[in-house]
Image (spheres, rainbow, N blue to C red):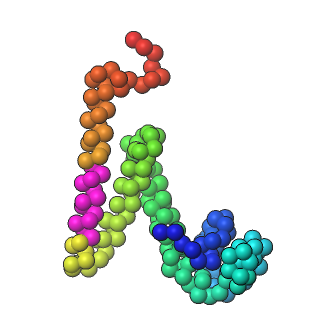
Amino acid sequence: MTRNGKIARLPQAIRQELNHRLQDGQKGRLLIAWLNGLPEVQTVLAAEFHGQPIAEDNLSRWKSGGYRTWQDEQNTRDAAIAMIEESPVLQEAGKKGLADRMAFFISAKMALQLRGLNRLPDGARKSEMWRELLDQFIRLRRGELQGERLRLELEKSGLGRDLSDPPA
């Protein structure tokens, strides 16, 4: 989903700084005054919002949308880093190609979802979320297994050798 509010239209560096300030617990009024005082913000507001300043409701919407998404991304990143640091096998997996790193990131995100799911009370919603997570996990594992089969077939045929190895 592309966000289109005043804060979402600001340069990324400013949004990042705002998110860090929110994380540090800075008060809304101070943040609004800080934002509205920045020349880059004034330029965006003049160009896209008829010069109307950022108000409390803009910050409130950002906190429940863009900031929350940022927090989720930070939590996923931190959890993935922690998992990698705890396991030499995962450190090695992180050195592989982009698809492997993406699969690892998705796995980390699923692990966080699982952790959050365990905290929910039992009920229909929790059961549905379990089914969705299990379905995602099964698809991920199938993809990993297909990739491993392909790697083994290429290795058997001699096409899977490392291109940096000298020919035999």
State the image quarter where residue 127 is shown.
bottom left
Q: Observer-nearest residue: 68 or 157?
A: 157
The residue furthest top is: 168
Q: Is residue 142 left or right of residue 96?
A: left
In which quadrant of the rendered view does residue 162 lie? Answer: top left
The location of residue 107, given as percent across then percent down, is: 36, 55
- Rendered position, 98 above or below 68: above
112 lies left or right of 4:
left
Q: How many marks?
A: 0
* Of 25 and 28, the residue lying toward us: 28
Q: Which residues are magenta?
A: 129-141
Residue 71 in sight from this viewpoint = no
Q: Residue 38 location in percent, x, y?
A: 76, 75
Residue situated in front as seen by the camera: 134 or 82:
134
* Drawn side of residue 92 relative to residue 41, left or right: left
Q: Position of residue 101 (x, y in %)?
A: 43, 47
**Residue drawn 48% across the image and 22% down it:** 164
Q: Is residue 54 visible?
A: yes
Name the quadrant of the C terminus: top left
